[in-house]
């Protein structure tokens, strides 16, 4: 899974010849067989673009040899996500499976195309949901649009498995109302002190496995469960990115997909808080010289490290180049040799100079603009 650090690394690279390829991919069905054909066609397009830049045939062949090996690896295409991004230079070849779709795109330049990846920093980040239940512990990897289970290989998936004997359903539904004896899984859990301690040990075992997995993933984690079970789990939690909000209900009746949808509603604000704060700040600065929705002005500011926060529209681009000697932005209707995607360049210059970049749907952009920015100074 690509991280912010991976994106920053790509933004910082300045290869003599760089190729960026983006294509939607599939996990099952006949479309999987078509994905490798799509990549083959996109590599041919990259070859044509490189030839137009007067790159020698020998150099092109060497540059594309590694990505072309993927075309003959059926196992590679059986394990894809919703999108695939490839970054090719004479020094490196990297690919990333992305959990959301984007349009097919090829760009050859002296830098990489990163704007399709910006949602990974903001709106389309991955998160995990832990469904706490005595009947069925589930850990789910989620995005806004997808859910898939994560195997808990070292932890029990139910209290019954943990205890290694059948649970007496009638006993579990009894409520004595005695302090520590109250059921942790209300309506499901035991009422005796021993039952409570068994469930605590069960939750501790689950926490150890979940934390081990989550530390490797470094995704935010949200818990779904009845109030007391969630509270008990938090007492033992050692994972720093467990968020404060939770889904406080019995998760058993909810499918993985339903849990994913409810989790997204809770965690969406976690992902978007900084962006919403900066959008409000942009509005508050209306009429001042500390914000702009003028592309030329923003490009110049980005090159000189003036941009604090940048808003870019998903899937959009604008061709041209910046003449640093004259501080003039030149625009073009189509890409030509030596010209850049100006929106991509603004994102690169902002990220590599410690600014924030947010990707939004075009209709959600501040002032409905093609680009917008908050400046560090007027």
Image: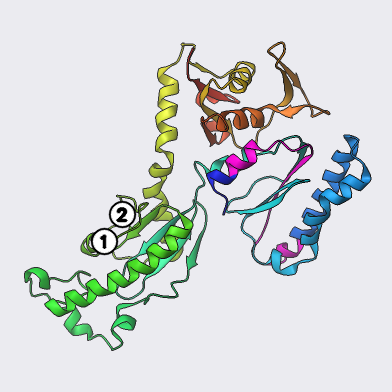
- Residue at 70% x, 69% y is 75
Residue 320 place in picture, x, y as percent: 74, 23
| Disc assigned to residue 49 | none
Taking the magenta stretch, the answer to whether it contains residue 231 is no
User: Dividing the image into 4 quarters, which one contains the N terminus?
Assistant: bottom right
Callout 1–callout 2 Cβ contact below 8 Å:
yes
Image quarter of residue 78: bottom right
Which span is picked out in magenta?
A: 7-34
Residue 323 appearing in the image? yes
* Relative to 37, 124 lies left or right: left
The secondary structure type at the circle numbered 1 is: helix
Residue 191 place in picture, x, y as percent: 13, 76
- Residue at 82% x, 44% y is 46
Q: Give me the C-alpha separation between circle 1 and circle 2.
A: 8 Å
Colour mapping used in the image: rainbow
Q: Residues within 10 Å of mark 1 (few under 14, many from 20)?
A: many
| Disc assigned to residue 246 | 2
* Relative to 356, 169 lies left or right: left
Q: Which of pointers 1 and 2 lies earlier in the amino acid sequence?
A: 1
The secondary structure type at the circle numbered 2 is: loop
Where 158 sits versus 373, above or below?
A: below
Image quarter of residue 109: top right
| Disc assigned to residue 230 | 1
Image quarter of residue 12: top right
Of 114 and 160, nearer the camera is 114
Of 101 and 289, nearer the camera is 289
Residue 291 place in picture, x, y as percent: 50, 17
Q: Residues within 10 Å of mark 2 (few under 14, many from 20)?
A: many
């Amino acid at each position: 899974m690509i991280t912010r650090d991976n994106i920053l690394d790509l933004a910082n690279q300045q290869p003599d010849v760089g190729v960026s390829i983006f294509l939607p991919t599939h996990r099952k069905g006949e479309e999987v067989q078509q994905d490798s054909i799509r990549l083959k066609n996109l590599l041919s397009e990259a070859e044509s673009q490189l030839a137009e830049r007067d790159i020698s045939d020998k150099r092109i062949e060497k540059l594309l040899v590694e990505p072309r090996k993927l075309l003959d690896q059926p196992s590679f295409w059986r394990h894809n996500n919703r999108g695939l991004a490839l970054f090719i230079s004479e020094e490196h070849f990297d690919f990333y499976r992305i959990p959301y779709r984007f349009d097919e795109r090829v760009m050859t330049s002296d830098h990489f195309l990163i704007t399709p990846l910006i949602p990974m920093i903001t709106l389309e980040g991955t998160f995990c949901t832990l469904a706490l239940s005595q009947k069925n512990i589930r850990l789910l990897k989620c995005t806004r649009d997808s859910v898939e289970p994560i195997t808990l290989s070292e932890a029990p998936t139910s209290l019954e498995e943990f205890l290694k004997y059948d649970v007496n359903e009638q006993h579990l539904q009894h409520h004595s109302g005695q302090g520590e004896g109250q059921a942790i899984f209300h309506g499901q859990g035991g009422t005796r002190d021993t039952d409570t301690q068994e469930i605590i040990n069960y939750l501790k075992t689950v926490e150890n496995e979940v934390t081990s997995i989550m530390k490797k993933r470094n995704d935010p984690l949200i818990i779904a469960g009845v109030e007391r079970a969630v509270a008990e789990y938090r007492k033992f939690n050692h994972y720093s990115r467990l968020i404060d909000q939770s889904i406080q209900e019995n998760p058993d009746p909810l499918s993985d997909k339903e849990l994913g949808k409810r989790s997204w509603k809770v965690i969406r604000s976690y992902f978007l808080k900084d962006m919403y704060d900066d959008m409000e700040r942009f509005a508050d600065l209306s009429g001042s010289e500390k914000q702009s929705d003028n592309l030329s002005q923003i490009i110049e500011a980005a090159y000189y490290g003036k941009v604090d926060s940048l808003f870019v529209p998903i899937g959009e681009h604008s061709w041209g180049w910046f003449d640093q000697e004259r501080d003039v932005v030149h625009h073009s209707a189509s890409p030509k040799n030596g010209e850049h995607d100006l929106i991509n360049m603004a994102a690169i210059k902002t990220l590599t100079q410690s600014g924030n970049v947010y990707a939004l749907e075009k209709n959600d952009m501040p002032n409905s603009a093609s680009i917008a920015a908050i400046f560090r100074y007027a």
